[in-house]
Image (tube, rainbow, N blue to C red):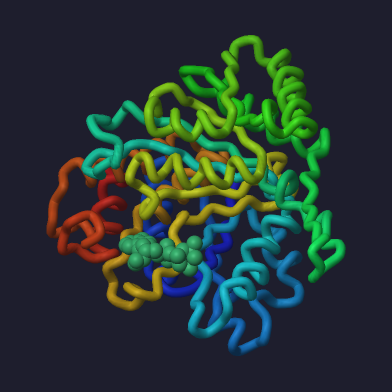
Amino acid sequence: MTHRIAVMPGDGIGTEVAPEGRRALEAAARRFDIALDFETFDFASCDYYLAHGRMLPEDWRQILGEFDALFFGAVGWPEKVPDHVSLWGSLLQFRREFDQYVNLRPCRLLPGIKSPLAGRQPGDIDFYVVRENTEGEYSSVGGTMFEGTDREVVIQETVMTRTGVDRVLKYAFDLAASRPRKKLTSATKSNGIAITMPWWDTRVAAAAEHYPEVSVDQFHIDILTANFVLHPDWFDVVVASNLFGDILSDLGPACTGTIGVAPSANINPEGRFPSLFEPVHGSAPDIAGRGIANPIGQIWSGAMMLEHLGYPEAGRAMLAAIEAVLDEGDERILTPDLGGQGSTQALGRAIAERIAS
Ligand code: ATP
Ligand code: MG
């Protein structure tokens, strides 16, 4: 079975790291005998917007809907197109129209990368944040009353649905059940947010009944953020609503010092629509065009994509290759952000060679 991958490099360093992601994926595909068919698109970029007045072609749903996965670089070039236009016109469209209701981010301490948390070694931190990606606190229900007067009132509602919460919990429990530690932590705030969050807790408890092998705990979001810093070794899979997950999915990678090389996935678990895999970093206009961008976030996103497509062994081999090259610490290969003098291509090639061997 051939898997069709749509590559959208996007803007800035996205166009430099996407080819390295593809190089690494091709190496993994050869080694593990996986048939990948890549097609590269120039839309979802600011240059496309300047030429066509829109970020995506009109029939993008049909074009991309036929692919098995979307492999994305980075979007945004604020000097040419305001960020809200480029982002809303591309990534947020995919998320909504392709119902990518899970946002997944690994938090893993890699060798050779300095964690801001003193004394932590690779192996100490290895967990996932699963963020609900479509509803919750980011609703547009609400408004302003008595605007401009002393009685002004602003309201924005949190909207949680049973379908929306149960499906992301199912994904998180399945993930926890598949991992050796089989542990799930729920982010809550039922002591202060008195309607939605106690209800969230009851949905977690209901889901837990289907997974007797998974041990479950929960923390209020305030102490949970503290524990990310103080006890990151406690966590295996952390599941959170849209807002709490937004915060945790930046804090987690930051604790491992990897926010610049971190990957992310926006997933439609049923596979009714393609899921999207992209590095966490943006288009980095400040270093674009110089060939020095670190390609690890893109390559690691490729590893997540192969896992999603049903090749966990190939995904693990890609991550192992990243770790081996980082562990060697060859300054001629590592990019400047890692303290080396290497280039995007040199680091990408070294990782691809390691995957192949
Ligand atoms: P966003 O896309 O969320 O708006 P941003 O535009 O604020 O993010 P980035 O584009 O991620 O931020 O860049 C932030 C900083 O990190 C910049 O100084 C950039 O050069 C650096 N950076 C980002 N990605 C990489 C990378 N892959 N390699 C090296 N440096 C990077
Ligand atoms: Mg940006």
Report x, y in % for residue 39. 55, 66
Q: Position of residue 24 (x, y in %)?
A: 37, 53
Name the residue furthest top: 212
* Above or below 143: residue 253: above
The residue shown at (55%, 23%) is 178
The residue lying toward the viewer, choosing from 126 and 249, is: 249
Residue drawn at (31%, 60%), measured in percent from left and top? 294
In front here: 163 or 18? Answer: 163
Q: Residue furthest right?
A: 146
Tell me if residue 355 comes above or below residue 206 in the rendering.
below
Q: Position of residue 303 (x, y in %)?
A: 45, 45
Whether residue 19 is visible, yes or no, is no
Q: How many marks?
A: 0
Residue extending furthest front? 150
Q: Is residue 165 visible?
A: yes
* Residue at (86, 62) in percent of width and height: 145
Question: Going by the image, does 186 lie left or right of 352?
Answer: right
Q: Quadrant of the C terminus?
A: top left
Measuring 45% from the left and 32% from the top, which residue is drawn there?
A: 226
Q: Position of residue 82 (x, y in %)?
A: 58, 78
Q: Which quadrant contains ligand 1?
A: bottom left
Does residue 47 appear to the left or right of 88 in the view shown? Answer: left
Question: Quarter-wise, where is residue 153 in the image?
Answer: bottom right
Asked if 348 appears above or below 318 in the picture, the reply is below
